[in-house]
Amino acid sequence: TERGENLWNGIDLREHGLPNGTQTLTVPGTHTLQEAIQIAHKSGAVIFVSPGDHYLKEDLLIDGNVTLLGIDGPTVHGTFNCTEGSRGLIAGLQLVGTAQANGTGVLNVSGGHWTLKDCSISCAASNDAVQIGGEATFHMYRCVIGCDARAYKGTASDNGAALWINGFANVKCVDCTFQGKQKGVFSQGCANSELQNCILCKNSSAVVLRDRSVVLVKSCTFINNSTGSYAVAEEAQKSAHRCTLIASENKFKNS
């Protein structure tokens, strides 16, 4: 459907940098989410995900330019894989991982340019929530990543990381929460990342750096991370400014 006005499904497309008259698709409808993504690759259409729970029958593959916008916070159960050369925006979705294999991410970005806004991503106990690698550029705003607070048992017993960064990835996170995992943010390889005004809450270790990875931490809050705020390898680099350590306050967020 092509509409002349900017407001569509209660969302102002201009807020996401989309022009007047942008073609739109709504799922579920006549197309599955995977089918809608293939159409969007060719047409540049924006995909709206309708309210409620949506279960993917197989891993979702995104290898082109895609914009996914949630209407009233829909929940998508499954795995998202964004390949090298892909790019786009995901906003207003709750992503819940269903994979049980160790080391599997719910959102896996192996390259391209991606932005996440106002999303939550939660995963099984042994897995990572978000994995960023290759030469990906990845920006995230106002997202809650890690263990789902509704299933939280009071300790950082989950393995894996809320955010795992590898390769030569370049990552920026603003106003995000990383919670309830063995590692809040785990960076290795030659990855470069920035955390600004984020909360790292009830992980085992809040930030873990390996190899030659670099992280800049600005105005972040660390709450009840059981084994410490930072674990930094010799060649890795950490720079922290105006951060706050809280040992007892509970700011765990619902996804």
Image (tube, helix red, strand yellow):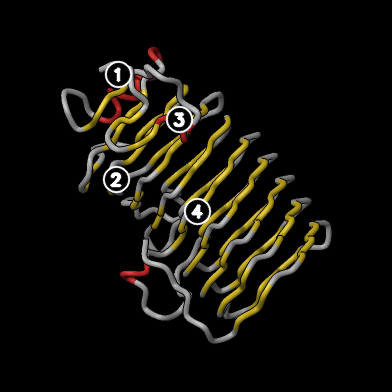
| Disc 2 and disc 4 in contact, CB within 8 angstroms | no
Q: Amino acid at mark 4?
A: Arg
Q: Position of residue 252 (x, y in %)?
A: 44, 72
Q: Residue 146, percent across and down?
A: 45, 61
Q: In the rendered view, would you say 254 is above or below 228? A: above
Q: Which circle marks residue 14 in the picture?
A: 3
**Residue at the far front in the pictured view:** 5
How packed mark 2 is, by other alpha carbons closer than 10 Å (few <14, some 14-19, many 20 or more), is many
Give the mark nearer the N terminus: 3 vs 2. 3
Marks 1,4: beta carbons within 8 A: no
Inspect the image, locate mark 3, and give the three-letter code of the amino acid beneath it.
Answer: Arg
Q: Residue at 40% across / 54% down in the picture?
A: 120
The answer to which of marks 2 and 4 sits earlier in the sequence is 2
**Amino acid type of disc 2?**
Val
Q: CA distance from mark 4 to mark 3?
A: 19 Å
Task: Pick whichever, 55 or 103, lies toward us.
Answer: 55
Instruction: Report the disc number at residue 3.
Output: 1
Separation (CA) of disc 3 from disc 2: 25 Å
**Is the Cβ of the residue at disc 1 closer than 8 Å to that at disc 3?**
no
- The residue indicated by pointer 4 is 142
Q: Tell me what residue is drawn at x 41 percent, y 19 percent.
A: 20
Do the CB atoms of the residues marked 2 and 1 lie less than 8 Å apart? Answer: no
- Between circles 2 and 4, the one closer to the viewer is 4
Q: CA distance from mark 1 to mark 3?
A: 13 Å
Label 1 amino acid? Answer: Arg
* For discs 1 and 4, the disc positioned in front in the rendered view: 1
> In the rendered image, which residue does mark 2 sit on?
76
Secondary element type, mark 3: helix
- Name above or below for residue 241 compared with residue 164: below
Earlier residue among tags 4 and 3: 3
Q: Nearer the viewer, mark 2 or mark 1?
A: 1
Where residue 113 appears, x then y in whole percent? 57, 31
